Amino acid sequence: MIPNFRRRDLLAWGAGAALAAPAWSQSGWPTKPVTCVVPFPAGGGTDAFARPFTLAFNKATTKNLIIDYRGGAGGTLGASVAAKMPADGYSCFMGAVHHTIAPSMYPKLDYDLERDFVPLALMATVPYVLVVNPKNLPVANLKEFLDLVKKSPGRFNYGSAGSGTAHHMAGELFKMQTQTFITHIPYRGTGPALQDLIAGNVDMMFDGLGSSAQHIRAGRIKPLMVAGQQRNASFPDIPCAGELGLKDYNVSTWYAMWMPRGTPAVIESEFIEVIKKSRDMPEIKTAWAANGADFPNLTGSAFGDFVSAETKRWAAVVKASGAKLD
């Protein structure tokens, strides 16, 4: 289990693991700690991948990657902060799929994901899972769930990391495809929403496996379905949407790294090399497997093209669902 740390955690690898400066570094970077803005509170999906990556970064560079949590407004507050940080190679931003949804939900953003940031790499992809509080919804499977929800339109609710996040859109897409009415309850991040789900203050969530995994294993929440057309290797007992009749419910979350536009190109390249090296580190493989995640090999401009495509895709979902800020 990944341990808890305080806000602006400085995660040091330890004196025993100190290494010489990596041979591939041409600029001498980094010579001091690098700050990574995580735009959601601790305990959420982004955090589940940001924390182990700090350990990998420290191991590869012998310098610290410091997490600066800036939650709020569906991840857009932190993105706004990161866009204004110095482009000197000592600031980065670990965002998520939510940031390709935000332009369609927040018409007055004071930053532009593609204009103000340089895309470094796609760090993790995780399928979405429908999880319920077993006391609020004592159902054994998706069929029983749908029967109960359809009998009482509007009675049940689902929590999300905030309006306009992938959690929100995953819920709206599910409602469209199952013709159900479930009330949306937005929170300031996945962590607070999960806490209220476990406490029974909300009934269900459409969440990434990365943040729900430990609670599923502990029996605090009950999974009914993973999105997509195949079961997840880390959770083979959870049926997938395709086998339950939802052939078009293909929703996943992803997490990625950017730096402010204007960062020296050599540093961008060296950061990408650190990310590539981290993929093969045992601690990263263990953390990603525990969270049911894949670590794609998608970096630089190819990742930038992926971001553009995702922004267009989610704009179409937002328009079709009629979703609005709550």
Image (cartoon, rainbow, N blue to C red):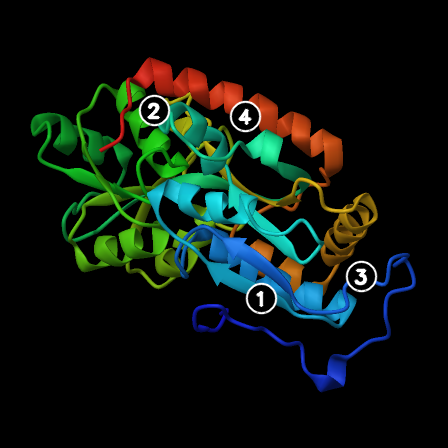
User: Residue 144 in the image: x percent, y percent?
Assistant: 20, 34
Depth check, mark 1 against mark 4: the one in front is: 1
Helix, strand or loop at disc 3? loop
Observer-nearest of 280 and 85: 85
Judging depth in this view, the residue of 105 and 212 nearest the camera is 105
3 and 2 marks in contact (CB < 8 Å): no
Rendered residue at 58%/57% (across/down): 36
* Residue 173 numbered mark, or none: 2
Q: Which residue in the structure is indicated by mark 4? A: 310
> Quadrant location of residue 221?
bottom left
Precedes in sequence: disc 4 or disc 2: 2
- Amino acid type at circle 2 is Leu
Quadrant into which the C terminus falls: top left
N-terminal of the pair, mark 1 or mark 2, is: 1
Q: Is residue 323 left or right of residue 97?
A: left
Local secondary structure at mark 1: strand
| Mark 2, secondary structure of its residue | helix
Amino acid at the residue labelled 4: Glu
Instruction: State whether residue 233 appears in this view.
Output: no
**Kind of residue at disc 1:** Ile
Position above or below: 60 against 248: below
Which of the two discs, 1 and 4, labels the residue nearer the N terminus?
A: 1
Q: CA distance from mark 3 to mark 4?
A: 32 Å
Which residue is painted at 16% across and 47% down in the image? Answer: 138
What mark, if any, has residue 66 been given in the picture? 1
Identify which residue is drawn at 66% across, 68% down. 33
Where residue 12 appears, as percent x and y from the top left, is 63, 76
Which comes sooner in the sequence, label 3 or label 4?
Answer: 3
